């Protein structure tokens, strides 16, 4: 069993595994501590509470946009994980809000990347989880995102971007596979260009005002699917990677506790028909991304 645990939990490190074995932290299904000398037995469970690192506090407040019997809707800051996982346990929306609101069964109804800010819907109790998670799984929610990315004249927007996205477990980047049918679709629209003469900003005349200078634009993104890193990949494929993206087009290998230069991607609005009472719901972020 010791050999298996060292191989399976490399993230803990050899010293960490030995330390936990010495303390009796690994137990079997009957709660009996494992020494590591036991024979490896497949299709059984090993239970443990892993050691937690001293997590730095993620900056930014979690704003509660809405709360009722079934739902808590929050405005998540950049860099804060939605759920406890990996090296982010205490510094996650679920752990912090369970404690703050006194809701031990609070859980998210959908996913929102750690680097993305904005609207996140959570259910208050286990009994409400299924109908809301099912609603997101069946794509019955209208999602609007806001992103800051380079401006490219002549890109031809709005347009729908479609591709096949593949993500390998343990690999940070996801990839688009051109030889496979699309499994991800995003409608991309241009909202505003920095320094443009009018609010629309999407004119060739506006582009000529700053010819040769780096220019940024605000885009509205409407994903029809919810693949991992979908919006980041689709803007990158258009030649306009999102500002401060540490993975696309290149993995910059940034420290996970580096809270500078937040990814300029915001989950701006969610709209759906409530699956329990049939009431239309709309939740909008109070945050705003600023054009450089």
Image: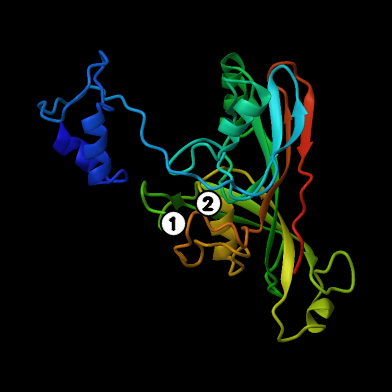
Q: Secondary structure at mark 1?
A: loop
Left or right position of 37 against 152: left
C-alpha gap between disc 1 and disc 2: 8 Å
Which residue occupies 61% across, 17% down?
125
Query: For the view shown, which residue lies furthest in the front direction?
Result: 23
Tell me if mark 1 has few (under 14), some (14-19) or many (20+) residues whose alpha carbon lies within 10 angstroms of its own: some
Report which residue position mark 2 lands on: 229
Q: Which mark is residue 173?
A: 1
Q: Position of residue 79 (x, y in %)?
A: 58, 50
For this orientation, the residue located farthest to the right is 198
Image spot of residue 143 (x, y percent) = 69, 42
Q: Residues within 10 Å of mark 2 (few under 14, many from 20)?
A: some
Q: Nearer the viewer, residue 291 or 200?
A: 291
Asked if residue 287 is positioned above or below residue 243 in the image, the reply reads above
Where is residue 201 shown, x and y percent of the image?
83, 69
The picture places residue 52, in percent across and down from the top left corner, at 42, 38
State if disc 2 and disc 1 touch (CB < 8 Å): yes
Q: Is residue 207 above or below residue 97?
A: below
Quarter where residue 263 is shown: bottom right
Residue that appears at 42% across and 53% down: 180
Q: Could you tell me which quadrant the N terminus lies in?
A: top left
**Which quarter of the figure has residue 93?**
top right
User: 3 or 49: nearer the eye?
Assistant: 49
């Amino acid at each position: 069993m010791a050999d298996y645990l060292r191989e399976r939990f490399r993230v803990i490190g050899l010293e960490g595994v030995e330390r936990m074995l010495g303390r009796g932290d690994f137990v079997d299904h009957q709660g009996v501590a494992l020494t590591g000398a036991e024979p490896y037995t497949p299709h059984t469970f090993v239970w443990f509470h892993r050691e937690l690192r001293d997590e730095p506090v993620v900056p930014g407040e979690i704003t509660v946009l809405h709360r009722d019997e079934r739902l808590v809707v929050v405005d998540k800051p950049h860099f804060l994980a939605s759920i406890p996982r990996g090296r982010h346990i205490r510094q996650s929306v679920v752990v912090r809000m369970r404690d703050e609101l006194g809701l031990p069964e609070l859980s998210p109804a959908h996913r929102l990347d750690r680097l993305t800010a904005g609207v996140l819907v959570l259910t208050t109790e286990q009994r409400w989880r299924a109908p809301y998670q099912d609603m997101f799984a069946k794509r019955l929610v209208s999602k609007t995102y806001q992103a800051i990315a380079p401006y490219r004249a002549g890109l031809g927007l709005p347009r729908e971007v479609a591709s096949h996205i593949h993500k390998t477990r343990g690999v940070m980047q996801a990839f688009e596979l051109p030889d496979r049918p699309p499994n991800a679709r995003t409608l991309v629209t241009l909202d505003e260009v920095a320094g443009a003469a009018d609010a629309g900003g999407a004119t060739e005349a506006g582009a000529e005002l700053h010819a040769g200078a780096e220019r940024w634009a605000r885009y509205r993104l409407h994903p029809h699917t919810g693949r991992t890193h979908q919006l980041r990949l689709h803007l990158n494929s258009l030649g306009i990677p999102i500002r401060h993206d540490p993975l696309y087009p290149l993995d910059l290998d940034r420290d996970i506790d580096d809270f500078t230069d937040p990814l300029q991607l915001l989950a701006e609005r969610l709209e759906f028909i409530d699956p329990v009472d049939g009431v239309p719901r709309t939740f909008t972020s109070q945050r705003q991304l600023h054009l450089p």
